Structure formats: C-alpha cells, structure tokens
C-alpha cells in the first residue's frame, strides 16, 4: 500500500518531482556516500588510559531464569543479582601497563527455586546472611583480585584467592586490537570452554570471542561480540554445560577516558534431549555492567548517546521475578 501511494504522489508531482530527485536528492545521496567512505577510512585507537589513583565504580546486574524438564518433572530457578564494583588504579609503568585492584563494595542478591520462598541478601541492609550467600558476603568490602593489563586491555597478571570465572559476561577487561582500527574491523580472542560429557568426563572446547567495531559516536566506540565454538559439540549434554559460558552482547568503550562504560550480554540457550529424549533445559538471561556516574555526568550522558547500537540488537528478554511490580500497558 505504501509503495502504491509513493507511485501516485510521484505521478502527481510530474516534472517537479523528477527535477527534485535529480538536483536535491542526488546531491544529498552523493554527500552521504562521501561521508560513509570517509567514516570507513577513519581509524580509532582504542587504548586503556587508567591513571594512578583513579577509582572507577561499576554496577553489575544479572537476571536469569533456568527451566529443566526430565522424566516428566519440571523445575525452575530464577535469580537476580546486583554487585557494586570498584577499580582502584595502583600503578602505571613506563610501558603504559596498568595495575588496579578490583573490589566488591556491595551486593544485593535474590534467588528462588520453584515455588519455594525466595532467598535474598542485601549487604547494605541485612545483618543476617543466608547460607547460600555466605561465601559472597565474606568478600564484600575486600579486594578480590589485582590485575595488570596492557594498554590494549590484555590481562598480563592476576593475583587472587578466587578461581577465575568462565561466566559468559567475559573477563574484567575487554581486549582491544594493538593497532588503530576502522569501523567494521573484526578481531578474535581465543578462549576455552569447560564442559562435561555423558560420562561425567571433563572436556575442553576450543572457542573464540569475535569482536567487531560497529560504529563510533560522540567519542564512544560501539563494539559487538559473541562466542564462536570451534570444537564440534558432539551432544546436547555437552551443550547443556556451556550455556552460561556463551556470549552475545555489546560494549560501549569511552575512547577519551580509556575504559568501557557499558557492557551488555544476553542468553537464550536450549538443550533438547540432554538427559533422555524428553528432557529439556533452557537458560534465558541478561547481564549489564555500567559505570556509575555522578548526577552531573548522568545528565550529560543522555540515553540517545548509547541507544543507536541497542536499537540494532534483538529485543531484550523480559524476565519477571516474583516480587516485581505489576506491569501496566501503555
């Protein structure tokens, strides 16, 4: 219907429409084409620029839902977690390598198994710590790891009493190319996924994280990333054990400040037949880590600055928890 309407309007416009298309539209298109070509040729040097004494606060939030069906029985788990983190930069050496301490400053955790009563813990308000969160609570307010990174973000040193997580939100830093890059450039970082097969044997799958510079706007580099598994996955059982290690998301890197200000990951994974023909495991979730800014900075960092890439991503999963407020239609 829209195409027919456009044809009619052009027919009514006659020669005037043709002249406009030849003069106005053609010049506009030529200008746009030139701008696109220049944008593709322009390069950007994505460097970490941490300074001694810097304290950068982040808020990490994850919501996830797991559904399991085996032998006719169904089980569900829903969780929500918020972790306030801080990078405190300790040193920058003559080569530009940076060392910073990672601290958890506060946590707010919630989880529910089936119809059981939810278990929750807020380090700011709760004196009593549920057994499920005791291990996490012990580290609140403490430095949990010290990292050394190259200007590219590559981790060259890590000191911690905690095992490094293979959780799909990625490592503490996002590795950048060693050279300036243009829009559309792709780079890959090898990784290994830990899995378990039908015989409870631990196996390691070769994989890589694929990154691409999608656009640059207002000194922010928008980077998409996803996990690509290189080792063939032989069974749904193996697939079921790597779901949370997969990545599919984007990063917003502040080129001027020299560190990521937003990272978002989504999961929508399924393993059909992982424990018998009628078994099904689904994992749906999202995680976001963003810099906590002052009120003045927040006003300057408008939503429109970060929204163009978000609009290009698949629609976010709406996960509802039991104590969430009712939704209203608009």
Image (tube, grey):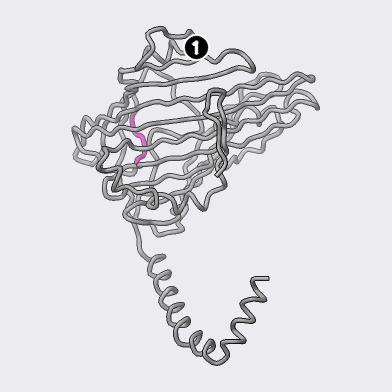
Q: Could you say where residue 163 lies in the image, as x and y percent from the top left? A: 44, 20
Residue at x 51%, y 33% (from the top left corner): 168
Q: Left or right: 229 with respect to 236?
A: left
Q: Could you say where residue 186 lies in the image, as x and y percent from the top left? A: 47, 53
Point out the image quarter for the N terminus.
bottom right
Residue at x 44%, y 74% (from the top left corner): 33
What secondary structure prevails in the magenta region?
strand
Task: State yes or no: residue 156 in magenta.
Answer: yes
Residue sitting farthest toward the bottom: 15
Badge 1: residue crowd in 10 Å (few <14, some 14–19, many ≥20): few
Task: Quadrant for residue 53, please give it.
Answer: top left
Q: Left or right: 295 with respect to 252?
A: left
Point out the image quarter for the C terminus.
top right
Task: State yes or no: residue 317 in magenta.
Answer: no
Query: Which residue, given by chain and number where applicable, does mark 1 sit on?
Result: 132
Q: Left or right: 182 with respect to 267?
A: left
- Camera-nearest residue between 63 and 20: 20
Q: Could you say where residue 211 lies in the image, as x and y percent from the top left? A: 47, 48
Residue at x 46%, y 35% (from the top left corner): 170
Indicate the secondary structure of the residue bearing disc 1.
helix
Q: Is residue 120 above or below residue 283?
A: above
Residue at x 48%, y 46% (from the top left corner): 188
Q: Is residue 302 above or below residue 240?
A: below
Q: Is residue 273 above or below residue 266?
A: above
Q: Which residues are magenta?
A: 153-157
Q: Could you say where residue 5 lies in the image, as x and y percent from the top left? A: 64, 76
């Amino acid at each position: 219907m829209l195409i027919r309407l456009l044809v009619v309007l052009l027919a009514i416009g006659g020669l005037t429409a043709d002249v406009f298309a030849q003069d106005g539209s053609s010049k506009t298109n030529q200008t746009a084409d030139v701008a696109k070509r220049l944008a593709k040729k322009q390069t950007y040097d994505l460097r970490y620029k941490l300074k001694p004494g810097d304290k950068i606060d982040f808020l990490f939030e994850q919501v996830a839902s797991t559904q399991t069906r085996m032998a006719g029985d169904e089980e569900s788990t829903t969780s929500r977690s918020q972790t306030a983190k801080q990078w405190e930069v300790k040193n920058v050496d003559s080569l530009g390598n940076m060392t910073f301490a990672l601290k958890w400053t506060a946590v707010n955790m919630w989880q529910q198994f089936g119809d059981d009563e939810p278990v929750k813990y807020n380090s700011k308000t709760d004196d009593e710590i549920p057994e499920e969160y005791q291990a996490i609570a012990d580290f609140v307010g403490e430095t949990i790891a010290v990292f050394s990174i190259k200007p590219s973000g590559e981790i060259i040193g890590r000191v911690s009493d905690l095992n490094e997580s293979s959780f799909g939100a990625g490592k503490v830093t996002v590795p950048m190319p060693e050279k300036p890059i243009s829009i559309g450039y792709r780079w890959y970082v090898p990784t290994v996924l830990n899995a378990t097969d039908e015989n409870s044997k631990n196996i390691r799958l070769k994989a890589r994280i694929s990154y691409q510079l999608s656009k640059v706007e207002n000194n922010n580099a928008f980077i998409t990333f996803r996990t690509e598994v290189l080792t063939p996955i032989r069974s749904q059982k193996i697939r079921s054990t790597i779901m949370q290690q997969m990545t599919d998301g984007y990063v917003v890197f502040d080129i001027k400040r020299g560190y990521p200000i937003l990272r978002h990951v989504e999961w929508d994974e399924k393993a059909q037949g992982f424990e018998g023909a009628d078994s099904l495991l689904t994992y749906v979730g999202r995680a976001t880590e963003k810099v906590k800014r002052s009120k003045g900075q927040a006003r300057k960092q408008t939503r429109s600055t970060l929204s163009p890439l978000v609009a290009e991503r698949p629609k976010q999963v709406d996960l509802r928890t039991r104590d969430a407020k009712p939704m209203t239609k608009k």
